[in-house]
């Protein structure tokens, strides 16, 4: 059933009223009409809100229809009102609409179509207006709810337009960022935050189209502020939306953690420094004790004296083992102990353990049995030193705690696939055994079964702790089983990559026989501040025909090299005035000519791998740890002397290609050598500046430029270095090595220039 439209018609002219009713009856609408002729009557009906639409004559007795319209609207009545007027004045029409009319119609259009269309439009407009008001109320309610939520949530929301004006600002503690709060909306953020350059910078970055997040302190409060640009369809920034979190407590916690971390790092470094220095202080006198004991052993001794010397040697070795345990443990704790991956022969490693410990086993009259499964591959890829260390600890313990019976070492293959093999190592003994309650504790630091064990067998209680950590570093696990007075068995599994396919037969080990005649007449400079170690080296080298000079500090080394030439430098690292690193740096960078390339052997009591790497990086040729072993020292010196002699015999520059191009024209060769001699120092200086400034593009260009004359003169060593520098600088890879490579190239270039200048003089 069609809805009846209720109409109130306010008109004082009876003719017009009858005409309106007649035209309305002709329409297709279902209506109910009530006609009144005074404003008072109209108000009484309007207050009841019983009508769907009101037609109101503009000219009524006493006042016009607009006053009634305004009264209706002021009282909150939303019924649509159509004003009927005799005028078609646009100004009057505007006034009507501003007063709240939904439409107006001239009396000349009060026909059936005009009235029907006006009713339909007004009712539709009224419905839309109701929807609009409902939406507005919903939006207002949602905005109030959102504002309430923001006000009680520990965040601050804001937005800024492209002109830098604040368009929105809400949130709890808004005043802590901007005193004045949301009253500052419309103001320029550049003025509001003129004292906070960080925040203004963040806004500018966001207005440029970039998201940005950073922590900024306002007073005593730290906020993490994120700014996100909102883009238009055309890709332009329409506004920046920001959110700020109070992260003061988190910042304080992070600061506390950072301080704690720094303190822990400083403590750890202090501990490492202490252990390293302790190692140095102990190893320095131990160097003399063991060294002189070895020299004493080479003299004629009676049986009693031999026994005394052997006891001293054993005591020294035990003390060194103790020091090494402490150093290894400290490196493991500091995370500075790394597992290497190098090819090794398994039988060689096991045989080394057997050779060292067989004598001790024989002394105690116990059997040391080694069983390696024939299916175990011999050539493996891994860390043989760490495997040796693990086996030495376990087998040494087994021998130590076994008074009768045997110690057995077994190696079995568990599995092999994808180029990898898993091996099981078993070390079993028939010794004193371990109570099952102590299985876990024996792997703890500084732990031994009892004080009686310590008194009888000695040790630090670090050996098995180190073993466990070394095995775990190689992704393995160790377990123990034992019975008191019957013996113990330690088992662990490790996985290795297979080495190259070589003959499975054990490689024969050749002992290098040194030609001691190469030492005769050589000038050796020893820089050592410890008198005992000075005396030891003098005795070690005394019978080799070496001209040995001894100085007490690095400054004396530098002074001596100003006037004298030596064949090799034995350089202690820790010395007064100038230490070993300072001396090496001075020689490699400040001394000119052949002396710049003098072979340097670092002597240090620090047993860290990092120490050896630091020595080599500083330009030293080799490294030997104290206590110094005579055979090792002579081997290193022999190698460097022979190598240096070979380098001196073979000129770096090969001008045969240049001569072939000249077709017998010696003037052409001389001219090319002269150009190289004049241009190269300038080019190397330019490259030094580029490398120091880390201008890698320029470095690459200069290295490429230098390669051409190097190839022309056949200077292969420098050409290869320049090739590496050019590639690394161009690709920006291995940048840390470029400075080291350049330093090496600079030294070689000086030698090449010296050779070329000699040829030019000839």
Image: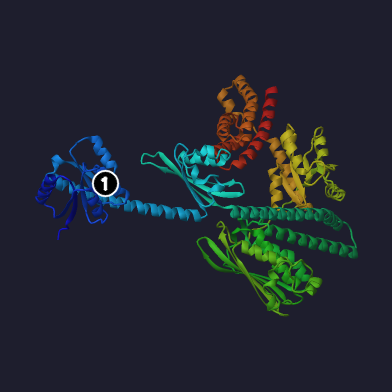
Quadrant for the C terminus in the image = top right
Instruction: From the image, tell me which residue sits under label 1.
Output: 68
**Residue 304 relative to residue 639: left or right:** right
Q: Position of residue 261 (x, y in %)?
A: 66, 54
Is 175 placed left or right of 129 in the picture?
Answer: right
Q: Is residue 709 visible?
A: yes
Instruction: Provide the secondary structure element on which disc 1 rests.
Output: helix
Tell me which residue sits at (53%, 40%) in the image: 192
Q: Is residue 684 left or right of residue 181?
A: right
Q: Nearer the viewer, residue 121 or 406?
A: 121
The structure residue drawn at horizontal position 66% and vertical position 60%, both measured from the top left corner, is 386
Inspect this view and state whether residue 511 appears.
Answer: no
Is 250 placed above or below 479 here?
above
The structure residue drawn at horizontal position 49% and vertical position 38%, both measured from the top left corner, is 188
Q: How is the image coloured?
A: rainbow
| Residue 412 place in picture, x, y as percent | 59, 69
């Amino acid at each position: 059933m069609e809805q009846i439209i209720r109409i109130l018609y306010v008109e004082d002219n009876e003719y017009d009223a009858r005409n309106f009713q007649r035209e309305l009856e002709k329409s297709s609408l279902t209506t109910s009409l009530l006609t009144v002729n005074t404003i008072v009557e109209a108000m009484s009906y309007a207050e009841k809100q019983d009508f769907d639409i009101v037609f109101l004559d503009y000219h009524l007795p006493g006042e016009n229809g607009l006053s009634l319209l305004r009264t209706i609207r002021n009282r909150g009545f939303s019924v649509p009102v159509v004003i009927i007027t005799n005028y078609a004045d646009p100004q009057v029409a505007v006034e009507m609409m501003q007063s709240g009319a939904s439409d107006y119609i001239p009396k000349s259009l009060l026909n059936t179509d005009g009235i029907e269309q006006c009713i339909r439009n007004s009712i539709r407009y009224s419905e839309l207006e109701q929807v609009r008001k409902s939406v507005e109320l919903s939006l207002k309610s949602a905005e109030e709810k959102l504002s309430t939520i923001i006000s009680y949530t520990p965040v601050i929301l804001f937005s800024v337009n492209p002109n830098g004006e604040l368009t929105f600002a809400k949130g709890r503690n808004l005043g802590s960022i901007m005193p004045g709060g949301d009253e500052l909306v419309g103001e320029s953020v550049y003025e509001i935050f003129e004292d906070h350059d960080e925040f203004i910078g963040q806004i500018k970055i966001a207005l440029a189209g970039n998201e940005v997040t950073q922590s900024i302190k306002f007073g005593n409060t730290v906020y993490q502020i994120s700014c996100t640009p909102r883009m238009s369809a055309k890709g332009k920034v329409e506004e920046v939306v920001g959110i700020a979190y109070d992260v003061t407590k988190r910042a304080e916690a992070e600061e506390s953690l950072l301080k704690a971390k720094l303190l822990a790092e400083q403590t750890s470094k202090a501990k490492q420094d202490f252990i390293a220095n302790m190692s140095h202080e102990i190893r320095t006198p131990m160097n003399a004790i063991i060294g002189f004991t070895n020299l004493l052993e080479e003299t004629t001794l009676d049986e009693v004296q031999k026994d005394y010397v052997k006891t001293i040697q054993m005591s020294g070795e035990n003390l060194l083992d103790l020091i090494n345990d402490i150093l290894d443990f400290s490196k493991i704790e500091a995370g500075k102990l790394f597992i290497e991956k190098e090819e090794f022969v398994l039988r060689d490693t096991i045989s080394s353990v057997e050779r060292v410990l067989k004598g001790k086993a024989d002394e105690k009259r116990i059997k040391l049995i080694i069983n390696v499964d024939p299916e175990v591959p011999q050539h493996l890829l891994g860390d043989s030193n760490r495997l040796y260390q693990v086996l030495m600890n376990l087998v040494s313990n087994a021998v130590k705690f076994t008074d009768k019976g045997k110690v057995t070492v077994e190696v079995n293959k568990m599995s092999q696939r994808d180029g990898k093999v898993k091996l099981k190592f078993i070390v079993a003994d028939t010794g004193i055994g371990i109570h099952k309650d102590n299985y876990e504790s024996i792997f703890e630091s500084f732990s031994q079964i009892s004080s009686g064990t310590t008194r009888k067998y000695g040790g630090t209680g670090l050996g098995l702790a180190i073993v466990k950590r070394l095995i775990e570093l190689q992704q393995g696990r160790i377990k123990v089983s034992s019975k008191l007075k019957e013996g113990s068995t330690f088992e662990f599994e490790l996985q290795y990559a297979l080495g190259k396919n070589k003959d499975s037969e054990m490689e024969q080990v050749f002992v290098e026989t040194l030609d001691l005649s190469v030492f005769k007449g050589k000038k050796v400079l020893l820089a050592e501040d410890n008198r005992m170690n000075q005396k030891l080296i003098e005795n070690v080298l005394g019978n080799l025909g070496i001209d040995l000079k001894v100085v007490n500090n690095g400054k004396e080394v530098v002074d001596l090299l100003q006037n004298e030439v030596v064949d090799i430098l034995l350089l202690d690292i820790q010395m007064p005035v100038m230490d070993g690193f300072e001396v090496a740096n001075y020689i490699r960078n400040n001394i000119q000519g052949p002396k710049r390339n003098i072979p340097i052997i670092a002597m240090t009591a620090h047993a860290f791998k990092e120490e050896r790497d630091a020595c080599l990086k500083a330009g030293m040729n080799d490294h030997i740890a104290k206590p110094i072993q005579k055979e090792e020292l002579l081997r290193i010196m022999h190698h460097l002397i022979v190598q240096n002699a070979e380098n001196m015999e073979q000129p770096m520059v090969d001008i045969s290609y240049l001569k072939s191009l000249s077709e017998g024209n010696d003037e052409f060769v001389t001219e090319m050598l002269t150009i190289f001699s004049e241009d190269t120092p300038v080019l190397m200086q330019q490259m030094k500046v580029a490398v120091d400034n880390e201008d890698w593009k320029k470095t690459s260009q200069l290295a490429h430029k230098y390669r051409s004359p190097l190839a022309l003169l056949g200077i292969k060593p420098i050409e290869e270095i320049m090739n590496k520098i050019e590639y690394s600088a161009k690709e920006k890879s291995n940048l840390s090595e470029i400075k080291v490579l350049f330093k090496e190239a600079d030294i070689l270039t000086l030698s090449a220039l010296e050779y070329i200048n000699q040829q030019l003089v000839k």
